[in-house]
Amino acid sequence: MKNNIRVERAIKNMTQAELAEKVKVSRQTINSIESNKYIPSTVLALKIAKVFGKPLEEIFMLESKDMK
């Protein structure tokens, strides 16, 4: 799964720590998600999308390997 969190944070001039605080996780969790080392829960993914005011599919995208 890919994501645009880093891009969306840059658009909103938001740090990882600020996003983490808004969605009630650690900065390290946001870093791991951005680095594709951790796939967030559905609830966390929805919270992140809500912070950016975008549909979930504009923040998180399935890759072809995820479809197998």
Image: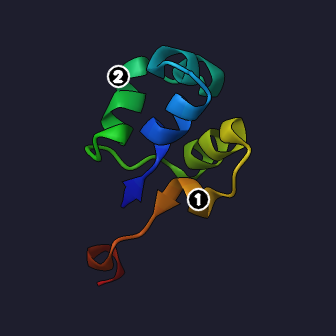
User: Relative to the observer, which residue lies in front, 8 or 43?
Assistant: 8
Specify the amino acid type for callout 2. Answer: Gln
Secondary structure category for the residue under label 2: helix
Counting residues from the start of the chain, the first of labels 2 and 1 encountered is 2
Q: Position of residue 46 (x, y in %)?
A: 64, 48
Q: Are marks 2 and 1 in contact (CB under 8 Å)?
A: no
Give the quarter of the figure containing the C terminus: bottom left
> Is 58 placed above or below 64 here?
above
User: Relative to the observer, which residue lies in front, 38 or 15?
Assistant: 15
Specify the amino acid type for callout 1. Answer: Glu
Secondary structure category for the residue under label 1: helix
Residue drawn at x 62%, y 28% as measured from the top left: 12
Name the residue that disc number 1 marks: 58
Instruction: Count residues near mark 2 (Cα–Cα under 10 Å), then give few for <14, some for 14-19, many for 20+.
Output: few
Residue drawn at x 69%, y 51% as measured from the top left: 54
Name the residue that disc number 2 marks: 28
Q: Position of residue 48 (x, y in %)?
A: 60, 40
